[in-house]
Structures are given as C-alpha cells and as structure tokens.
Image (cartoon, rainbow, N blue to C red):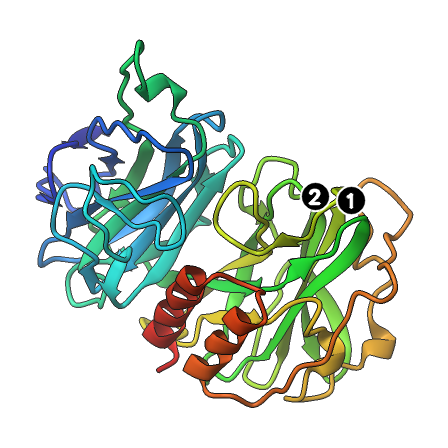
Amino acid sequence: MALVVISLVLGLCVGAFSAPAPDTPKQIDLLMPHVQPKVPDTYLCHGMKLNSSATYITGFIPNANMNIAHHMLLYGCTSPGMKKPVWNCGEMASDSSMFDTAPTCASGAKILYAWAMDAPSLSLPKDVAFAVGGDTDIKYLVLQVHYKNVTTFLPPQNGNDTSGLNLITQKTKLPRRAGVYLMGTGGRIKPKSTVFMETACKFESNLEIHPFAFRTHTHTLGRVVSGYRIRDGKWTEIGRMNPQKPQMFYNVTTPNLTVKPGDILAARCTMLNDRDTTVKIGNTQNDEMCNFYIMYYINTTKLVQDSVCSSRGAPSWSWADFRDGDMNLEAMPNTVSVIPGTTTALNETVDTRSVHPVGMVWSSYFEQLVEDNIITKELSEYYLDLTLSVNP
C-alpha cells in the first residue's frame, strides 16, 4: 500500500487527509517546527487542527532523542491552549520570553500517548484505534515536548529541533476505540528514605474497559511502579515495571483483564531518595513524578470521561487513607514493590507519613497541596485544569 507522508512543520496545521482509498494507511507527521528552546525544562506545544471526517490512529512512531527531550505527550483537545504555531505550555517550568504561554489544551484535554527514555514505536492491537476528528470531541492534536537539554540550540551550534511523532492512521472505522486512564500522585520524598507514592480510585464509569497496555513514569528516584485492579477484595496486576527502563507502553501482565463499574484501581511508585534533600513531585528534571498509564480499548464509541486518578501522595496520603471502598490491603500481593527480575521487595522507611484532612472539593484539594508544599502553585493549576476537563 502507498504510504502518504504529510509534513506538518509550519503553524497550526489542518489535517487534510486525502487518500486514494479509505482503508489506505497514512503517516501523519506531527513535529516541532524547527524550534530553538533556550532554557532547560522548557515545555513547548505545537498543534494540528483535524478535519470534519474522523481519523483513526493505529500506531505511534517517536522521533526524539532522550538526551534532548525528557518526554513527549500527545494530547487530544476540544480546543488547543493557543492557535499559534508554538507556545510555552510549561505552567510550572521555565519562563521563556520567546514563546507566549498557555495551557496545553484550553478544553477537553485527553492524553493519547506518552514517550520517554528512547521508548520504541507502538502499534495498537488489531481492530483498536484512537478516534479523532469528525464528530468526536477531539478537534485538535497537540504535541507537548519537555526539553531537558538545550545546549545544541545555543551558540555556537544554534541548532533547531523537530522532535515529534509519526502517526499511523486510516479512515476506515475500527470496532474498538482506544483510550488512556492516568494515575498519579503529588507529594514529596524525604531525604535518605524509601517512600511509597500511592493513589487509588473507585472506577465510577458505567462502561467496561479492556486494558491492553501500561506505561510507568518517574524521574531518577523511581525503582518500580505497579498498578492493580481490585475486585471483591482480590488484587489483579495490570502491570509492574522498572521506570528506569525505556518508558514505553508494555503489554499488561494479566491478559484478558477487564475493569468494570465498582472496581478499584490502585497504583504505587516505590521511590528511593539517596539525596540529602527532600524531592517534591513537580515538572522539572530535578523534581519527581509518579505516573501509571493504562491504555485500554472499549467496544463502544464512548470513552471513560473520568480518566484521571490522583492523590496527595506521601507523606499525607497512602492506600490506608482510601475511603471509597474496601481495598482489602491484607490481600495485597507481596510483589508490589519488587523490581521485575528481582525477588526482594523494597521496604518503606518508617516515619515518612503524615495525616491531612480529606473530602475537599477539587479546587480546595489542590490549594491544600500547595499550602502543604507538596506541589507548586503552577503544577496545582495544571492538575486542576486536567481534572476538571474530565471530572467537572
């Protein structure tokens, strides 16, 4: 079959998907338009407007170097943060006078794909695709790149960057629609300690999802990240991985897994801080992150609307603080904090917990995180925007 390459390197581009046949695969290049970030930890976004007929994404080919790009995220948006070719979407990172600042999405933010640490390409299972454009609520695709090293863009080299993604697409509708469910924490990690960063949520959707891939993300302190479905008190592993390996989407460790209304989803990042200072959750490479991504398919055209599960994280929240059902912690697998390929569990350092009130509205919840110095004000605004976009 012919492979039609559409270059999207100038401006906020319109995806004019012309093809000789509706089932002909096409590669769509969503690449940074020769940008020159000047400050480490700059976050830049570049968007593409989709056309009036639906497009189905079946694969992702990354074009990036982990020595330059800390990570890339692909968002689907109802409207982008800005309709300029490039904007600074790093709400909590470096200010750059070169670019106007705006959020990644102005509305309808949904994460479709994530890349870090030279992860390889991803092809979705047979009959599974992300539906974008057309009558979906994803009207724009927005590429976000976090630049950790900008040396090659400064004098005397004065280089530019075209990091991004090649999207494998088709026009023929596929029966199974893909989505991403994101789990993460705020919090901080005390010096010279091993800390469990934990989150859990009751799955409130009236839909049944089929997880087929998972991805873990931390910075340098993460040792193992694990995720679980809990049904009727029984724990079933979705995935467990060392986040220092390529941060790709791996096949779930329990095939044919489903998540139904009333199930509990839980994730833990086991962090080892050998530094002499406390490390907070944040968006610079000197901070930390704790994320567990679940990529799933569903046998309807609808997707899970409440697709973000977040907690305060340590030291103010742990699984023991969960109040929306019985997690049956006594039945927790003894491998939760075991790095794959090893046999010994990492144990949490004592006295790393504190108690905080619960039951707040979303805005108060994130304001409290700022007051407790768990996350920055900018990061709280980012998480609040993302949460309200899917859980108003």
Question: Position of 76 compared to 180: left or right?
Answer: left
- Residue at x-position 53% and y-position 62%: 375
Residue 233 sits in quarter: bottom right
Percent position of residue 143, x then y: 29, 45
Question: Position of 174 compared to 307: left or right?
Answer: left
The answer to whether residue 88 of the structure is visible from this angle is: yes
- Residue at x-position 38% and y-position 54%: 112
Q: Which residue lies furthest to the top in this view?
A: 156
Quadrant holding the C terminus = bottom left
Query: What amino acid is labelled 2 in the image?
Result: Asn
Q: In the depicted view, which residue is nearer to us: 137 or 127?
A: 137
- Residue at x-position 46% and y-position 41%: 115
Q: Where 160 falls versus 204 (above or below)?
A: above
What numbered label is drawn on residue 340?
1
Mark in front: 1 vs 2: 2
Q: How crowded is mark 2: few (under 14 residues within 10 Å), some or many (20 or more)?
A: many
What numbered label is drawn on residue 242?
2
Percent position of residue 310, x then y: 54, 70
